[in-house]
Amino acid sequence: MADIVCASAFRPFIIAYQSPTNLRISLMTSISYVKQQRITRLCVRCGLLLMQYGAESAVVVDLSKRLGLALGMNSVECSLNFNAITLTTICDERCITTTRDTINQSINVNLLVQIQQIVNKTEATIDHNDLIDRTTLAFDELDKTVYPTWLVSIFVGASCAAFAYLNGGSWSITAVTFIAGMVAMFTRIYLSKHHFNPFITVIVTAFIASLIGATTYYFDIGNNADIAVASSVLLLIPSFPLINSLSDILKGYVNIGVGRAVFTYMLTLSACVGIVMALVLLRIQHWGF
């Protein structure tokens, strides 16, 4: 009895000097079902945004798990498909599972960095009062602004023109390539904003770029018309998705990696279809170096 009384007397001091891990465990026990639902929604929202704006699978899973653990979950499990994410939070042997569909958006690295900063800030927070509300507010205030369409089109056209010039194109070839790349990028952004099928978008964009670039054949512009046609469609090379697909496969996310690879190859095939359509329309018999 004396030992029990003694332990009870010193209990406040034991709680006061418990480690951060034990403190987090003690906080987990007070999480209600409603709070766990909110945490689950935050975690799946984090994963959705990362997938939609171009993050690789390892980053999606890692940040989603870290956010859930920082908000008080015992465990967070995450499963990814090409167009869906399934996430489960576990707290006191109570599981909540949710599944969300993803919609492909344009790549936005700035948004990915903001989400990582939110997760880091949540992990570093010592005061857990209203932490869920503050994290939700941070996600609501994400800066999703992008550069104006005209500015992106000009710089993409300039990059295509620079490639043409570096490959031996004359100034006239460079000018035609600049116009073709700029108009093609403007068309691609316009179609994407209106939610056209991505393959149809690529076909139309490649067709317009090749059509403008191939005018160098008809009007005998510059020293090598092939350079203009080849350089004007460089904006359609899906380099970022291809790198992500290879990274996913190498890191063990084979299913989504293969899905992204197939999507990348289909985009490339769509670009080829658009180029061939333009060349056939203009009755160009030969093309290539």
Image: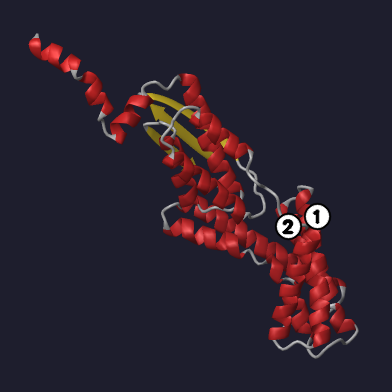
How crowded is the residue under tag 2: few (<14 C-alpha within 10 Å), some, or many (20+)? few
- The quarter of the picture where residue 233 lies is bottom right
**Callout 2 amino acid:** Tyr
Looking at the rendered image, the quarter that the N terminus falls into is top left
Q: Which residue is mark 2?
A: 147
- The quarter of the picture where residue 26 lies is top left
Vertical order, 266 against 278 (above or below)? above
| Nearer-the-camera pick, 17 or 208 | 17
Q: Is residue 277 visible?
A: no
**Mark pair 1, 2: CA separation:** 14 Å
Q: Residue at x 51, y 50 (%)?
A: 256
Mark seen at residue 123: none
**Callout 1 amino acid:** Tyr
At which x and y percent is residue 188?
77, 59
Q: Earlier in the sequence, mark 1 or mark 2?
A: 2
Vertical order, 259 against 178 (above or below)? above
Q: Which residue is mark 1?
A: 190
